[in-house]
Amino acid sequence: MLFAALAMVFTACENYEPAQPQSNPQEPIMSAEGLSVAPVDTTATPSFDLKALYDLAVNAAVLNIVEAQNLPAVGDLTFVMQMSKSNDFASVQEVATSIENNQVCVKPADWQAASLKVLGKNPKTQDAYVRFAAYVVNGTSSVRIGDPNLYYGAHKVTITPFPAERVIEEAYSLVINGGEAVAFNHSGDQYDNPVFSLKVDYAEAQEWAVKGAELTFAPVAGDVENTGTLVEGEGWGEMPVGPWVLSINMETLTYSFAPAFDNLWTPGDANGWNHGGSQMLFTTDYANYFGFANLSVSGFKFTSAADWSHINYGDAGDGKLSTDGGAGNLTVEESGLYWCDVNIAALTWKATKIETIGVIGEFNGWSESLPLTSEDGIFWTGTITLNEGDQYKFRCNNDWAINLGGEDEYNLVPNGANLKAPAAGTFTITLDLSVVPYACYLE
């Protein structure tokens, strides 16, 4: 009867659409004995070209079912694949599977959708990790095989995603009058963030174009002032008299000129919507702005000046900003001190809650941060013992994601160089967030 049940599963799964296991905190569990699987290739890292499989209308076979015994006669064996960028599976995306000829298979389109979330939009071949949860499904009921921490067939795979609709190069330059070339600023992967930007300031109109390592793009005037499109090939556009921030989006092949400004203000409920009392974000490339700000759940906005008469950035949803003056306020889940990352070219923002600020360095073997305390969230102090020349930095939340350093103690920037103690002794150390860039003092 068991073999008959398995035969039914394996012969009918070519068009099999597996039922999704229910999410249940106390999911029924059955014994894992009698079920074993193995990667399709046990001698090397299996490779999957998702677009090639899709074009052939073939599903990707990821696991071989080696043994399937002691399963219920009623119900279908099925698996859910989890995909992760790391072998600890700290963050995963789940993918439905089917069973074909004693193999666990995944639709290429489903795998592509998960790959975009796990690996990003870059179409280059990358490594990933997969593992599988096993279930017996009968209608809307499912029984987990093994305990909730049991996964089958965990192994590394190599994925070649679908090609991108347009090739985006890693770097581009602004070419002025056919001669001078200046590299655009950019951060992150070019496919996940296709916006490149540069501050330009010319007293007279200039001819300009965009050049990558392989292709050249010419600007074509748009219908809206200071915006337009880029087309592949030779040609020139006319740059307005500055200062401006020129942003190019190499995914949409569009460009825009926006006023250049040194800071963003953070008026909101935490400071009585007072620009003068709000903290400022600063920039090194006139596209990315960053810094500390006290924010309230009741709302706030970013502004390009210390008033409401210039550009006001409100909520466009899903981590996006709107320059519409009537856009709603931005919000955070909990009032407090935050580290803000804003990209005015891509119109994106993120705020990370600051739970702790500390000092780390040679004085403590670069281990746990020495915690600082603050009464107002602006001045953070502590006592520290240093040798002359000891290197140190500030970091938040006892982690390196947000850290401050610099060439000197009056110019602290994210991911800056290690600071050095000018002398030996025990000091009161103060991190000053009232000025931008930030400063620190040893007294």
Image: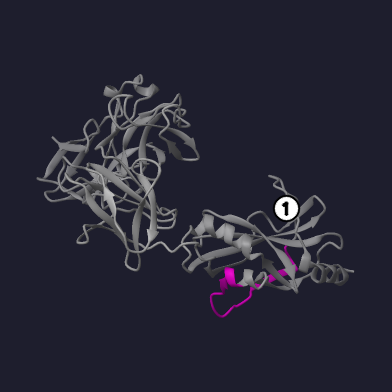
For label 1, the crowd category at 10 Å Cα-Cα, with few meaning under 14, some 14 to 19 and many 20 or more, is many
Does residue 89 appear in this view?
no
Give, as a single range, the part of the protein colored magenta. 32-52
- Looking at the rendering, in which quadrant would you find the N terminus? bottom right
Q: Quadrant of the C terminus?
A: top left
Residue named by callout 1: 21
Q: Please, what secondary structure does the residue beneath circle 1 have?
A: loop
Q: Quadrant of residue 287?
A: top left
- The type of residue carrying mark 1 is Pro
Q: Which residue is nearer to you in this view: 46 or 305?
A: 305
Instruction: Looking at the picture, tell me which residue is in the foreground, 299 or 385.
Output: 299
Report x, y in % for residue 325: 41, 28
In the displayed structure, does residue 220 sit left or right of residue 391?
right
Residue at 40 percent of width and 38 percent of height: 351
Q: Position of residue 186 (x, y in %)?
A: 32, 53
Task: Tell me: residue 273, above or below residue 441.
Answer: above
Q: Is residue 44 magenta?
A: yes
Name the quadrant containing residue 274: top left
